[in-house]
């Protein structure tokens, strides 16, 4: 059984359970780990900070963060992803999606420290695009991304071997979503592919198909199957049967040679744990509950949700749509809850609700909280570099090739 990557973390919860003493059994280390009673430092880096983490209830956290920022001055540049909680966003110099933030980091060569309030793959992208003289810091190393963790370098290399054995690797171009690890971006660069965002996925796919003979080309889309499928069907006019899903946990990806040869889009079996939870029932329920509501969703949602929505677009697109929406309009938004709540506060003249009745934050993004941010800033102000994210030079080289191909897209 494959061990999950270090960036993948389980949320710990306290459960009401019968004690081991009651059952007269000795719990195994694994059982204790799953119950949150023990820790595995080798696979849970970032759970403990090498210093004193401020208590979440500390009433002076905001002032401490401000004081540390003031001590650091222009040496530090703080980036905040849209999905971060408000207590963190208030200290961001720039807010945005993952690629915008990485670009902003690269545009600040005078900043010695880039504090990235996001998740691991985002900090990796910032390190790839910034200079060697800059240090990218992730306040909590346990802030990973479940989607990015669904495609490991070993699994993708094995997939390419399967495509080679099927005789289709030579006509396949990898296109990897920005929400992927540096290793996957490097794989994409090595094999002549490009990176895409949810905003430019259509252009990236058009480019990829144009790299091979008309009618023969294929795309291996990593790691989010939903963005790949939605873009292929909604924007490029492909049929659902043109898409197959490669499952890395099954022999040959669970696909026959015939299926691989017939497919136009080979979709990796990955998804966003937040966007993937929205369902057609969510759409039907909100339409019944709020007459006249506009359903606005992210393209990481399932195809049936996207097909039933009124508007579909990236995080930046969602923000722009709601900014421009007329007063009195009603919106049900299918994206991360922190952002939806923030947009509702910013637009009190509009009715903006979360698409699903069940609350769902991005749990790994929420690991970056005010105590971790204060700890990181105070450590830097005291001359201690903590939680630095570094991508090795070879990986950086090929990942940058893939990113540069994206930047050159027409």
Image: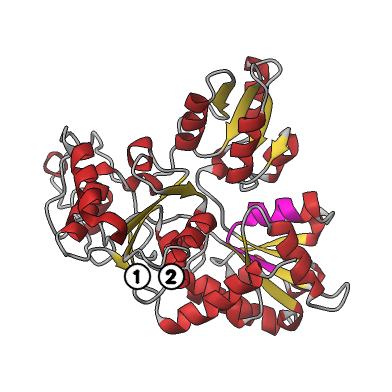
- Relative placement, left or right, of 341 versus 46 is right
Identity of the residue furthest to the right in this view: 214
Find residue 185 and report its horizontal and vertical position in percent: 54, 71
Could you say which disc has been placed on residue 73 in the image?
A: none
- Relative placement, left or right, of 127 versus 76 is right
Q: Residue at x 48, y 35 (%)?
A: 337
In magenta segment, residue 227: yes
User: Dot 2, how many residues are within 10 Å of its Cα: few (below 14), some (14-19), or many (20+)?
Assistant: many
- Relative placement, left or right, of 254 versus 97 is right
The residue that mark 2 highlights is 130
- Disc 2/disc 1 C-alpha distance (Å): 7 Å
Viewer-nearest residue: 294 or 38: 294
Q: In this picture, which residue range is highlighted in magenta?
A: 220-231
Viewer-nearest residue: 281 or 114: 114
Q: Secondary structure at mark 2?
A: loop
How many numbered callouts?
Answer: 2
Find residue 296 and report its horizontal and vertical position in percent: 65, 34
User: Dot 1, how many residues are within 10 Å of its Cα: few (below 14), some (14-19), or many (20+)?
Assistant: many
Is residue 91 depicted above or below 120 in this figure?
Answer: above
Is residue 1 depicted above or below 282 in this figure?
Answer: below
Find residue 186 and report its horizontal and vertical position in percent: 53, 76
The residue that mark 1 highlights is 134
- Relative placement, left or right, of 1 versus 199 is left
User: Residue 371's quadrant in the figure?
Assistant: top left
In magenta segment, residue 343: no
Disc 2 and disc 1 in contact, CB within 8 angstroms: yes
Q: Secondary structure at mark 1?
A: loop
Q: Residue at x 46, y 55 (%)?
A: 146
Quarter the C terminus occupies: bottom right
Q: Is residue 365 visible?
A: yes
Find residue 382 and report its horizontal and vertical position in percent: 14, 60
């Amino acid at each position: 059984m494959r061990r999950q990557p270090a960036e993948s973390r389980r949320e710990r919860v306290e459960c009401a359970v019968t004690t081991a003493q009651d059952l007269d059994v000795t719990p195994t280390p694994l059982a204790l780990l799953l119950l949150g009673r023990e820790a595995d430092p080798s696979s849970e880096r970032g759970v403990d900070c090498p210093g004193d983490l401020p208590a979440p209830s500390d009433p002076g956290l905001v002032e401490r963060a401000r004081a540390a920022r003031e001590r650091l001055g222009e040496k530090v540049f703080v980036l905040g992803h849209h999905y971060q909680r408000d207590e963190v966003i208030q200290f961001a110099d720039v807010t945005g999606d993952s690629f915008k933030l990485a670009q902003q980091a690269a545009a600040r060569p005078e900043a010695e420290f880039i504090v990235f309030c996001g998740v691991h793959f985002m900090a990796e992208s910032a390190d790839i695009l910034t200079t060697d003289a800059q240090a990218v810091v992730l306040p909590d190393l346990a802030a990973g991304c479940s989607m990015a963790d669904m495609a490991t370098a070993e699994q993708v290399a094995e997939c390419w071997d399967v495509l080679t054995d099927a005789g289709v690797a030579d006509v396949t171009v990898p296109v990897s979503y920005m929400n992927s690890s540096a290793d996957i971006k490097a794989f994409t660069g090595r094999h002549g592919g490009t990176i895409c965002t949810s905003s430019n996925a259509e252009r990236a796919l058009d480019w990829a198909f144009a790299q091979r003979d008309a009618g023969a080309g294929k795309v291996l889309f990593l790691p989010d199957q939903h963005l790949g499928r939605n873009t292929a069907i909604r924007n490029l006019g492909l049929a659902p049967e043109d898409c197959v899903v490669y499952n890395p946990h099954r022999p040959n990806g669970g696909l026959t040679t015939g299926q691989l040869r017939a497919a136009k889009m080979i979709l990796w079996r990955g998804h966003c744990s937040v966007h993937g939870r929205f369902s057609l029932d969510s759409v039907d329920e909100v339409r019944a509950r709020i007459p006249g509501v506009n359903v606005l969703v992210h393209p990481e949602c399932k195809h049936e949700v996207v097909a039933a929505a009124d508007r579909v677009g990236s995080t930046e697109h969602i923000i722009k749509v709601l900014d421009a929406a007329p007063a009195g309009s009603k919106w049900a938004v299918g994206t991360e809850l922190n952002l939806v709540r923030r947009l509702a506060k910013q637009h009190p003249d509009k009715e903006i609700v979360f698409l699903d009745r069940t609350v769902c934050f991005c749990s790994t993004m929420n690991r970056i909280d005010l105590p971790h941010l204060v700890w990181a800033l105070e450590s830097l102000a005291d001359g201690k570099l903590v939680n630095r994210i570094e991508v090795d030079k070879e990986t950086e080289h090929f990942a940058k090739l893939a990113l540069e191909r994206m930047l050159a897209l027409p």
